[in-house]
Amino acid sequence: MTTSAPESVLDVISELLIEKFEVPSEDVRGNAPMRDLLIDSLMIVEMAIAVHETLGIKVEEEELRAATLAEFAAAVDERLTDR
């Protein structure tokens, strides 16, 4: 019997990028810098809000600017685990 695993934080953030921010799915890779995926300051602020609303985790705008998608997802996942 197989049970489906809960959606990973990386998957959730990737879906936000593709669906909410209309980032082309081929650009959404773990090694992509978040600052390249979220091309302006407003998108970064909106992503911080979307992560908080979706996952209940507060993130700083600077975190989004400094990390790759995989690094950012890992940091958010760690905070979820620490709760």
Image (tube, rainbow, N blue to C red):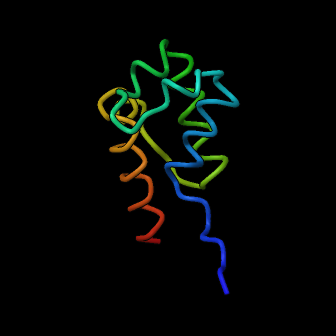
- From the viewer's perspective, tell me whether residue 80 is left or right of residue 51: left
Tell me residue 8's x, y (percent). 54, 58
Tell me residue 6's x, y (percent). 61, 67
Residue shown at the point (56%, 49%) measured from the top left:
11
| Tag count | 0
Tell me residue 67's x, y (percent). 32, 35
- From the viewer's perspective, tell me whether residue 29 is left or right of residue 4: left
The outermost residue toward the left is: 66
Residue shown at the point (59%, 48%) measured from the top left:
12
Q: Nearer the viewer, residue 2 or 32?
A: 2
Q: Is residue 3 above or below residue 46?
A: below
Q: Pick the quarter of the image with the N terminus.
A: bottom right
Q: Nearer the viewer, residue 48 or 17?
A: 17
The outermost residue toward the top is: 40
Residue shown at the point (58%, 22%) measured from the top left:
23
Residue shown at the point (60%, 37%) measured from the top left:
49
Q: Is residue 45 above or below residue 51?
A: above
Tell me residue 5's x, y (percent). 60, 70
- From the viewer's perspective, tell me whether residue 40 is left or right of residue 78: right
The outermost residue toward the front is: 1
